[in-house]
Amino acid sequence: MEFEKLVRGEPGQYVASSGAIKELPARLVIFQQPVIVTGQKSYAAFVKHGGNQPNWPVLFYDQTASHEDMNRLAEKAKSLGADVLIGVGGGKVMDTTKGIADRLGIEAVFVPTLVSTCACSTPLLVAYHPDHTFKSIDYCQRSGFMTVVDYDLLLDSPREFFISGISDTLAKWYELEAIHRGKNRADLPALVQLALATAKVSLDILLQDTETAVADFDQNKLSPAFQRIVDTTFAIAANVGCQTSDYVSGAHALHNGLTLLHETHSIAHGLKVSYGILVQLCLTGDRDEVRKLLPFYQKNGYIYSWKQLGVTEDRAAAMQKVAEFATSSKESYINIDQNIQTQDVVKAMLTLESLVEEVYG
């Protein structure tokens, strides 16, 4: 079996509570030389909420999650004698940390400072070119040693990324369902059946709790709904990908295509994915599902129209560019149907614009 197809585990430990990062030194006593990998803003949040932490060395990434930066930081971590890395930050920090740990053959601990993706719980990473365009999905040799989720820290994070994490998680159901649509569920491998069931659980929690959780987040209120959304984004979503390798399809393929447009680089990962979900649903003929989701999108701040992307390039040319990338042989639209063509995706994007006009005028 190809390495990329292997079933993978989530982190060995998932620690989630208020003030969880204050316990980090006690949880890492088995290691001799922890080294932190982080960004400037993420590290400031870690210091603010972490209390008195040991004077561990700190390495700052260059915000690209590129192989080049992973190589650079791996050399620095090696020279420091690191035997465990502590990734502190959002998805790109998590992925950079995994890449370094894989290069050095050491353990990794993840402390998310944003509720933005499930990167803190998955044994794969998204690598970009130094110019921030998508490069590849890399599969790591080992899962994380531990994920430490501090609800207090996350309540203090930027709202945009909380919204982004919810939409990135929402995609788990729609992408996986599209891949296996039309197949007899009972005939699917047991772990794929588990992944589908898990993805449906995540969808149900998101549709049930998002409005309350976002309102509680805005009031800095630690509530059961907020905790459920956080754990769904980090742990349940990650479990879907751990059970089956083929779980990503149209929404993330479109996200990757959108990275070719520089205006989208400032838009959080999950918000681009949210747009990709609707395009995928238009392509698969699920217009009623799009109509059902549009009020949810508008209420919670998701991207549902091309205009919201802020692209200044000619629309037809830009859509063509994005769709060509999304339907390339290395992209995940082929997980739905290998016969999907560039123009099918362009048509789906235009169909979405028509539906939005129909609903909102």
Image (tube, rainbow, N blue to C red):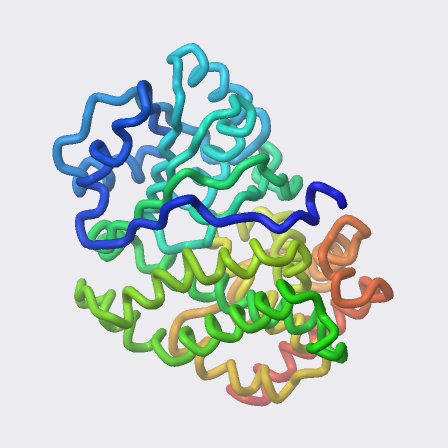
Q: Quadrant of the C terminus?
A: bottom right
Q: Is residue 60 above or below residue 326?
A: above
Residue beneath the point at 17% across and 66% down: 221
Q: Is residue 275 left or right of residue 166?
A: right
Q: Quadrant of the N terminus?
A: top right
Residue beneath the point at 48% across and 64% down: 169
Total numbered circles: 0
Horizontal and vertical percent position of residue 225: 28, 72
* Residue 11 visible in the picture: yes
Residue beneath the point at 52% across and 35% down: 65
Residue placed furthest toward the right: 339
Q: Which residue is nearer to you in this view: 107 or 276?
A: 107
Horizontal and vertical percent position of residue 273: 55, 61
Q: Which residue is nearer to you in this view: 237 or 38?
A: 237
Horizontal and vertical percent position of residue 91: 45, 45
Horizontal and vertical percent position of residue 68: 58, 25
Residue placed furthest toward the top: 79
* Residue 361 visible in the picture: no
Q: Which residue is nearer to you in this view: 341 or 239?
A: 239
Q: Quadrant of residue 314?
A: bottom right
Q: Is residue 152 above or below residue 77?
A: below
Q: Is residue 223 left or right of residue 320?
A: left
Q: Is residue 304 left or right of residue 82?
A: right
